[in-house]
Image (tube, rainbow, N blue to C red):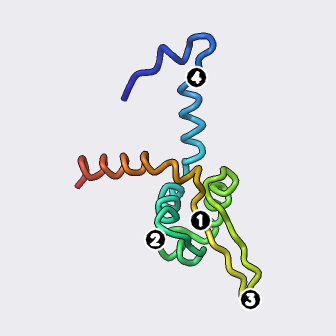
């Protein structure tokens, strides 16, 4: 990784450490990246996501989806049907993370498979 330690302290330059901490905070969460990866594949309903992620509880999935929605990374669409239907989709803002996800997959395949 490139060392940015000197650039963060000059007047008028962004604090890159602070910016990275903010980015990490948006993506932090045991399940968030997995949820985003699944939604990048296609639109899912809540139950589909729950079945696709072993070990996640209903409460945790709900909390993670709400946080992702609040951060503008997931779009929740409620349909006026009986029974009610709710779809979850990835937003363009989240889709912009694709290069990072591709790099993460390449890193994994290089060093762990």
Q: Nearer the viewer, mark 4 or mark 1?
A: 1
Q: Quadrant of residue 9?
A: top right
Which residue occupies 55% across, 70% down? 43
First in sequence: mark 4 or mark 1?
4
Image quadrant holding the N terminus, namely top left
Q: Disc 3 designates what residue?
A: 82
Residue that sits furthest to the top in the current view: 11
Q: Label 4 near label 2: C-beta < 8 Å?
A: no
Q: Nearer the viewer, mark 2 or mark 4?
A: 4
Task: Bin the neighbour count of mark 3 within 10 Å (Cα to Cα): few under 14, some 14-19, many 20 and up.
Answer: few
| Residue 67: percent from left, percent from top | 66, 55
First in sequence: mark 2 or mark 1?
2
Task: Bin the neighbour count of mark 1 within 10 Å (Cα to Cα): few under 14, some 14-19, many 20 and up.
Answer: many
| Residue 58: percent from left, percent from top | 61, 71
Q: CA distance from mark 3 to mark 4?
A: 50 Å
Q: Label 3 near label 2: C-beta < 8 Å?
A: no
Looking at the image, residue 35 sits to the left or right of residue 80; the answer is left
- Residue 54: assigned label: 2
Q: Looking at the image, is 7 positioned above or below residue 69?
A: above
Q: Secondary structure at mark 4?
A: loop
Q: Quadrant of residue 8?
A: top right
Q: CA distance from mark 3 to mark 1?
A: 21 Å
Q: Disc 4 designates what residue?
A: 15
Looking at the image, residue 85 sits to the left or right of residue 22; the answer is right
């Amino acid at each position: 990784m490139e060392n940015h330690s000197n650039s963060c302290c000059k007047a008028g330059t962004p604090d890159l450490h602070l910016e990275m901490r903010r980015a990490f905070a948006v993506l932090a969460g045991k399940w968030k990246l997995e949820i985003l990866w699944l939604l990048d594949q296609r639109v899912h309903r809540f139950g589909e996501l729950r079945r696709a992620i072993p070990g996640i509880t209903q409460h945790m999935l709900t909390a993670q989806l709400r946080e992702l929605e609040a951060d503008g990374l997931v779009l929740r669409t409620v349909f006026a049907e009986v029974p009610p239907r709710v779809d979850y989709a990835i937003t363009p803002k989240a889709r912009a993370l694709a290069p990072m996800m591709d790099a993460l997959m390449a890193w994994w395949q290089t060093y762990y498979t």
